[in-house]
Amino acid sequence: MHRSNSGGRKEQNDRLLYEILVTIFASLNIVDLAAASLVCKTWNKACRDPSLWHKLDLSTLTSYCFNTPPNKIGAYRRSSSKITQFLKHVLSLSNGNTTCLIFNYYVYITDEQLIMVAERTRKLKRVVLPKTGDFSRAGVNSAMTLWRGLESITITSAVPGHYIFPALGRYCNNITEMKFSCGCIFEEKHAEAMVKYTPKLKMLSIRSIPASMKALQCVLRFLEHLKMVNVCHSFIRDTSDRRLYGLGFDDLRNCLSPLSLGKLIYCEGYLEGGWCLRCQNGHDNSRSRQPYGPLEDVWREDEITSLATGNHNILPSRTPLWINRFRTN
């Protein structure tokens, strides 16, 4: 009886220690969590708790981990083998429980790394792609085949549109959220591809990038389920006009119906200070963040909170995020 009670107390103590460790580890970034898993078997077991791995945020990787120049796009390209080793380790800890994957903005991802990550994250619902990478059509297709449950994606110029859209249409039939960022230009060909391959889209962000008015009209007209389009600080222009100038509020009212206008998230405080993230947070011009810091902000942040990475100060969802000033009585 005494031995039975002792065994029960030991089991309770072990369980309590496990829960305490998991609670502590939940506050660690991905690098520190990976390091903690190497301390001992007890810590390693706690580091594998599924609750720690629903969101795998690689944006917290810092340059000192791989002896690379800080805050430089593509800086990790020469450390590809170290990145691969690190990814394999953290993905083994996650045990396939990751549903949200955020790549590092500065990390250079190869085809092999993308496929390797996809093979270990088959439950993925949301992915934020990096700024740079070496992706082939076959590599993108292989990843999307494994990410059939994908619902949300942030696209950068690292993946050509004629690779990603057909792959999404063929393998990922539940895409409801999409963001164009960092080096992208939202053109008519993108809009037409979205109508064809992602007809269930509900949320779209083209904030702070150049965009074609015809492309915007296309998605607003033909995507039946579209509820919000974030155009904060986007440079929207009429591509049929050779003059290089952005369209203002009056132009939008003339080009779009009241129903379409009501779906836009728009900030008009560029000069006077508005409510959007860019106006509220301002620009951090510290030397350590130059010259790519502001671009990283565009990649991270979004007024549609489900499309934000969650690392910066995000304005809470609120009404009106919808621009009611466009609505007619």
Image (tube, rainbow, N blue to C red):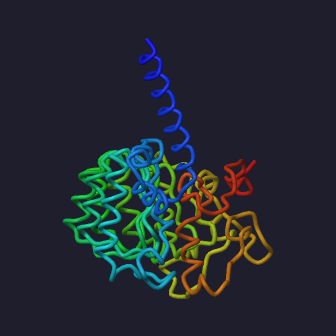
Does residue 144 appear to the left or right of 64 in the view shown? left
Is residue 285 shown above or below 232?
A: below
**Near-viewer residue (287 or 192):** 287
* Residue 227 in view, yes or no: yes
Question: Which residue is found at the position 48% from the left and 55% from the top?
Answer: 221
Does residue 140 appear to the left or right of 283 in the view shown? left
**Near-viewer residue (151 or 225):** 151
List the single residue furthest toward the right. 272
Q: Give x and y (percent) for residue 19.
A: 52, 37
**Near-viewer residue (272 or 145):** 145
Q: Quadrant of residue 260?
A: bottom right
Q: Quadrant of residue 243?
A: bottom right
Is residue 291 shown above or below 177?
A: below
Q: Give x and y (percent) for residue 167.
A: 26, 58
List the single residue furthest toward the left. 138
Q: Quadrant of residue 283?
A: bottom right
Q: Quadrant of the N terminus?
A: top left
Q: Give x and y (percent) for residue 115.
A: 25, 61
Question: Which residue is found at the position 30% from the left and 51% from the top?
Answer: 147
**Near-viewer residue (261 or 126):** 126
